[in-house]
Image: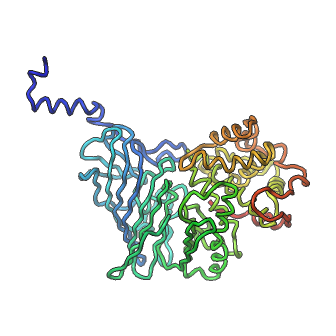
Amino acid sequence: MHRRIIAPGALAAASVLLAIPASAASGTPGAPGIGDPYYPAYGNGGYDVSHYDLRLKYQPATDELEGTATILARTTQDLSRFDLDFLLDVSEVRVNGAVASFTTAGEHELVVTPKSPLAKGTAVTVVVRYRGVPSSKKAYGFTSWHRTPDGGVGANEPEAAWWWFPSNDHPLDKATYDVSVLVPDGTQAISNGTLQSTSSRLGWTRFNWRSNKPQATYLATLAVGRFDITTGTSDSGIPVVNAYSKDLGDNYDAARSSVERTGEIADWLSGWFGPYPYNALGGYVPNTTTGYALETQTRPFYSPRQFANGSNTSVVVHELAHQWYGDLVSVAGWKDIWINEGFARYAQWLWSEHEGEGTAQELADYVYASHPADDPFWTVKPGDPGPENQFDIAVYDRGALALQALRNEIGDDAFFAILKGWPQRYAYGNASVADFQRYAEQVSGKPLAALFDTWLFQPVKPGAPAAREASVAARTLGAPGAPVQPRSWKKIAATNGVHAH
């Protein structure tokens, strides 16, 4: 009856209004943070990114970067505006083809207001045009962009993207990537994944890289400079691309002696953690002054200082172990950093055993004995260290001790089943320390709350080491590797001291 007295135009308008929920007519702003208690302003609410397409031009002589980022996403709420994490100077933003207004807020927020509100579940294409000098930008008093003599590098944790592309910067929002970079001839651009193509014209060369598996934003990397590039294939068939700055000086040969073993080490790690989860391998060593290494997905970053004392395969093991523990399965929140660093450190201990330079048990005993009960080392809780201690040595070493304690409690069969099964259970997703405890209990059939509490959450030295009798501890492991020959305590200390993210 009522429909008969509504004019056709009014009926069409009413149908549109009925199709859109009332809340979508205005929407609500997306949160300026994704909800991480360690870093409340990191990441953003209201949308989920599926893909970043980055088309960039970089001038090494001046550190000038200009680019267009096309971001494919889907809204998770009715959205009136949303934030991106970014620092460079923006000239234009478009949302679904229409010009959007934008402003900045806080230390690193780009606030975008679409021409029209977006309903929950809407597919969104965001285009951001920008330029700037990354090395001139700081947030919270620091920079994650490394200026080098022949270019620049974006690599840091827990944040690096802000300096070269706009993003939803938190591991909870993984995406795939296409990174296309135009640089002067004679200069190379290194990024994650596979090199799809290169082309040269008018004195410039374009490098097109693709990461086809979900990748956290802090694991995306860009390095521009003059590199020696090597290529190969691992025994398991994964293409390997490594890059070394031409001006590494005395560290050059040690860096190559280490990183060139990437394919071998990744294949060895797959014996512990399961099949390598990506279609590309490698590493790069730019001429930076920083001291750390980082597990940038498929192509870890290594500073030259990692090789100042000679070859260092242990750090390569550490960063490649992260490809499973940290990259394939990423933290649910930054408090879960133990799942990254404790496991990567333990992989170094397994490598030491493989190389005949000390068993995992000997290393655990050494670490435990090296820190008296009043050492502040024991006040750091690896299971929730706080942002100020996120990369404290205790997260690494006490974190690895916790794994040795777990191994001794549940036995080798269950322990190594967990190491291999965990990456498959949460592949390409996120998980927490609590998730790992539940999984370990499920696989082992044992209650483990007390053990996890003792080794990960109590700010005191546990009453007993993660130890067994020496005759038991020194036995050869049942995974791929040579028979074990213990080494001197001094060498154990040197390997244990490797610093890496």
320 is higher (above) or lower (below) than 307: above
455 is higher (above) or lower (below) than 246: above
Coloring basis for residues: rainbow
Which image quadrant: the N terminus? top left
For image coordinates 38% across by 69% down, the residue present is 65
For image coordinates 24% across by 53% down, the residue present is 99
Provide residue 140's location: percent of width, then percent of height: 49, 55
22 is higher (above) or lower (below) than 482: above
Which quadrant of the structure image shows residue 228?
bottom right
Q: Nearer the viewer, residue 325 or 26?
A: 325
Q: Nearer the viewer, residue 14 or 307?
A: 14
Query: Is residue 419 shown to the viewer in this render?
Result: yes
Q: Nearer the viewer, residue 304 or 38?
A: 304
197 is higher (above) or lower (below) than 322: below
Query: Is residue 288 shown to the viewer in this render?
Result: no
Q: How many marks?
A: 0
For image coordinates 25% across by 32% down, the residue present is 19
For image coordinates 80% across by 54% down, the residue present is 364
Provide residue 315's location: percent of width, then percent of height: 67, 65
Provide residue 270's location: percent of width, then percent of height: 66, 58
Which image quadrant: the C terminus? bottom right
Which quadrant of the structure image shows residue 91?
bottom left
Q: Nearer the viewer, residue 110 or 348?
A: 348
Provide residue 113's location: percent of width, then percent of height: 29, 47
User: Is residue 266 shown left or right of residue 33?
Assistant: right
